[in-house]
Image (tube, rainbow, N blue to C red):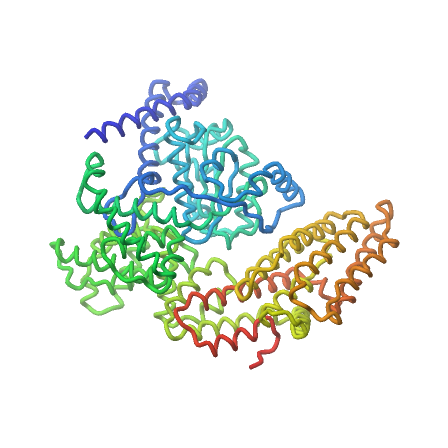
């Protein structure tokens, strides 16, 4: 009771705080002589604030841990997350956007060079923050934590008195056209008068903390989303913004946003989370109140946490899985009080955890339900979930109205034997609500079904593909689509004994991306150069590294130049799958400088200087590869570039003369390194295909690593064909 009184007192304080903020809005619309009486208006706003705070607290300040029957406060389980600067190359809508981004990056030089940055500090310091991370790394949890801290102002460590608004991109642009309407709908649902006008009023005054979660979950392309978000921020710059997205889906820069990447958890984070998880779990088991939990729960929780931690220490696979918050939560479910064995990979972890959750729920239904549910089983629940997951994912749909789900269930159950048709759809929906891996929530459109994390939907989609033998179809239609990346990785992990089929299908599809004359010539050059390199590297590594020498450059347009920089980023990740890291950082800096010099039309002397600088950086980075000097001779290239200095036109000469000199630099580079002369004239489609080719190769290697086992003979043959035109045995 004391806790409830304390919470109610806290809510009253919050209501008073926001009543004071919104008094100006009430005065504004009442002075207009509109239909609202001032006393009625104040009362309506006060009630709406109360509804908003309670709704926000219920939706975004508590968390339903997988396997637990009651939600717990986010604060009780939250681990302070750390970030590092994210410096990969993105696309920009215009040169002005790019210059603004670089200017703000220089202003934030302390952060841009930093690692281990505390998330709360970043949220306090940065008006516009872009949070990037791997799947299930904790991006949504971080946004919710900052929102809950903002709600608790001034008793929290968040420094700004702002009303948090949490917007999930899975809903954006399916029923709303703009971020403004999305915010207005949040207000309308709680009963605020004139919700759109209120949204504009608060936005113009800078009264909101806008949390935009999951750009990668929107049906819109990232380019469209980037434009919408940047335009919105430009219109309402006085508010604070935090946006999240998966790393692999983030392509177009948001301009003035500081981009940071979530760091994987270290041992201290893992230990702290395990102890918190076991404590919350023990409280749930004993049915304790907040007041008695410490005395009664600490010892059993501590014992379970120590046992779980010990198991992680003796298992390399488990230690790797524990770096992801969601995976660690599933490990805790298996190890802390159930004492299951540790699975072999992420797919196995999800399989074992989900089966456990389904099994416990079915047993509970059999014991407690008065309705005849003898036909209900884990197999049926799993069959239903994989069907819903796949149907939605194919349409890029992450939420389903109850009407749609009911139709799905009627259709699905009607296709099976009579004993399945006897199952009650309301009973199935009730079971879903209690699972934790999916939920039924209230939205603007009424009640909707959704998976509690997109990773669960991706797992079930992979399971559908595996069970229905749709691997070839998946590869043909979705290999280059970043939206499906996690599905491929889950599928590889569950394809016990036949992952080779997946990899060989991927290899066949990969060749279609490079099946163009210019790109084929490029691969031939890579293979020839690597064949004569004598350094102690794998053959595939030499071919990948050769791309850093041969990649198209000296382009006059910014968009393709930046796309090719992203190609190098993928190439670097792919190379590091096979061999020890090389120092590519300065190469990337020199490449970017040269790309910008051409795109922004720098003077010719600067361009030749930057070309020579790139030559030097490539030579230093690749010295240990030991390319044949008759094929790749950086000294000879540098000498020929130096000879061009005397011919460099000044900036007063015509653009045609300067373009001709730029072509001379390009020709000198290609001829000296024996590159195909048309390699610097790729179309946007060819560049896109080259990027897809590298991405698909990277994904294929990641799938190989995700598999439990693979024939070394088969993989060695596949590896020998990477970055080669012909499939040679």
Rendered residue at 53%/42% (across/down):
229
163 or 42: nearer the eye?
163
Determine the residue positioned at 36% across, 71% down.
468
Front one among 47 and 584: 584
Horizontal side, residue 60 vs residue 263: left or right: left
Task: Pinpoint residue 49: horizontal percent, then vertical percent.
Answer: 35, 28
Judge by depth and name the residue closer to the eye, 456 or 51.
Answer: 456
Q: Quadrant of the N terminus?
A: top left
Percent position of residue 326, x then y: 36, 52
Image quarter of the C terminus: bottom right
Residue placed at 37% from the left, 35% from the top?
148
Q: Quadrant of residue 583?
A: bottom right
Direction bottom: furthest residue? 729
User: Quadrant of residue 561 in the image?
Assistant: bottom right
Specify the farthest residue to the left: 370
Q: Is residue 508 left or right of residue 491?
A: right
Where residue 495 sits in the image (x, y, percent)? 38, 70
Q: Residue at x 34, y 48 (%)?
A: 271
Query: Is residue 199 something one can see in this rendering?
Result: yes
- Horizontal placement of 68 versus 718: left or right? left
What is the number of callouts on the image?
0
Say if 179 sits above or below 672 in the image.
above
The answer to whether one can see residue 403 in this image is: no
Expressed as whole percent of the image width and height from the top left, the position of residue 297 reads 21, 42
């Amino acid at each position: 009771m004391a806790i409830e009184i304390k919470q109610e007192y806290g809510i009253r304080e919050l209501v008073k705080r926001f009543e004071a903020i919104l008094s100006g809005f009430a005065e504004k619309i009442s002075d207009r002589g509109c239909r609202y009486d001032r006393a009625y208006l104040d009362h309506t706003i006060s009630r709406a604030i109360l509804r908003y705070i309670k709704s926000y607290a219920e939706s975004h300040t508590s968390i339903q841990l997988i396997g637990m029957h009651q939600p717990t406060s986010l604060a009780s389980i939250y681990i302070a997350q750390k970030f590092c600067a994210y410096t990969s190359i993105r696309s920009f809508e215009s040169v002005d956007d790019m210059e603004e981004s670089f200017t703000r990056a220089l202003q934030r030089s302390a952060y841009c060079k930093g690692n281990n940055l505390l998330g709360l500090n970043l949220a306090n310091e940065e008006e516009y923050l872009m949070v990037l991370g791997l799947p299930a790394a904790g991006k949504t949890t971080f946004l919710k934590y900052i929102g809950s801290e903002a709600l608790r102002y001034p008793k929290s460590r968040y420094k700004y008195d702002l009303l948090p608004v949490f917007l999930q991109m899975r809903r954006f642009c399916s029923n709303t056209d703009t971020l403004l309407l999305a915010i207005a709908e949040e207000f309308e649902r709680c009963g605020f008068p004139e919700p759109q006008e209120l949204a504009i009023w608060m936005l113009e005054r800078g009264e909101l903390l806008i949390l935009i979660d999951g750009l990668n979950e929107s049906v819109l392309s990232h380019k469209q989303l980037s434009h919408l978000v940047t335009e919105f921020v430009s219109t309402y710059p006085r508010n604070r913004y935090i946006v999240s997205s998966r790393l692999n889906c983030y392509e177009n820069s948001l301009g003035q946003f500081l981009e940071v990447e979530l760091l994987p958890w270290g041992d201290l984070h893992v230990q702290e989370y395990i102890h918190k998880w076991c404590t919350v779990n023990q409280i749930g088991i004993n049915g304790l109140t907040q007041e008695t939990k410490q005395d009664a729960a600490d010892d059993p929780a501590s014992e379970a946490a120590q046992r779980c931690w010990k198991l992680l220490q003796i298992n390399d696979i488990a230690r790797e899985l524990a770096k992801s918050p969601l995976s660690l939560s599933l490990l805790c479910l298996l190890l802390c009080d159930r004492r299951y064995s540790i699975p072999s990979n992420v797919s196995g972890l999800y399989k074992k955890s989900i089966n456990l959750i389904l099994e416990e729920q079915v047993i509970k239904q059999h014991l407690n339900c008065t309705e005849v549910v003898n036909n209900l089983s884990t197999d049926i629940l799993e069959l239903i979930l994989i069907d819903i997951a796949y149907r939605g994912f194919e349409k890029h749909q992450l939420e389903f109205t109850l009407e749609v789900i009911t139709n799905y269930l009627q259709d699905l159950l009607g296709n099976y034997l009579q004993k399945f048709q006897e199952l009650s759809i309301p009973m199935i929906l009730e079971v879903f609500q209690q699972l934790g891996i999916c939920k039924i929530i209230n939205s603007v459109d009424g009640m909707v079904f959704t998976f509690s994390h997109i990773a669960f939907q991706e797992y079930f989609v992979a399971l559908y593909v595996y069970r229905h033998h749709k691997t070839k179809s998946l590869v043909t239609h979705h290999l280059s689509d970043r939206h499906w990346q996690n599905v491929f990785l889950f599928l590889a992990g569950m394809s016990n004994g036949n992952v080779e089929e997946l990899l060989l299908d991927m290899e066949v599809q990969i060749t279609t991306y490079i099946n163009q004359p210019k790109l084929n010539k490029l691969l031939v050059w890579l293979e020839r150069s690597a064949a004569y390199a004598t350094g102690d590297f794998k053959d595939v590594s030499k071919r990948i590294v050769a791309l850093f020498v041969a990649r198209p450059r000296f382009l006059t347009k910014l968009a393709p130049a930046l796309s090719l920089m992203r190609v190098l980023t993928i190439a670097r990740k792919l190379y590091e799958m096979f061999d020890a890291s090389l120092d590519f950082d300065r190469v990337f800096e020199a490449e970017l400088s040269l790309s910008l010099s051409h795109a922004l039309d720098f003077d010719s002397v600067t361009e030749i200087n930057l070309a020579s600088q790139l030559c030097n950086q490539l030579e230093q980075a690749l010295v240990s590869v030991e390319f044949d000097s008759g094929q790749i001779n950086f000294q000879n290239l540098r000498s020929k570039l130096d000879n061009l200095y005397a011919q460099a036109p000044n900036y007063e000469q015509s653009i045609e003369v300067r373009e001709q000199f730029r072509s001379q630099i390009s020709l000198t580079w290609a001829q000296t390194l024996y590159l195909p002369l048309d390699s610097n004239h790729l179309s946007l489609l060819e560049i896109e295909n080259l990027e897809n080719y590298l991405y698909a190769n990277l994904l294929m290697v990641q799938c190989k690593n995700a598999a439990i086992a693979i024939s070394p003979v088969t993989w060695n043959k596949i590896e020998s064909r990477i970055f080669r035109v012909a499939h040679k045995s």
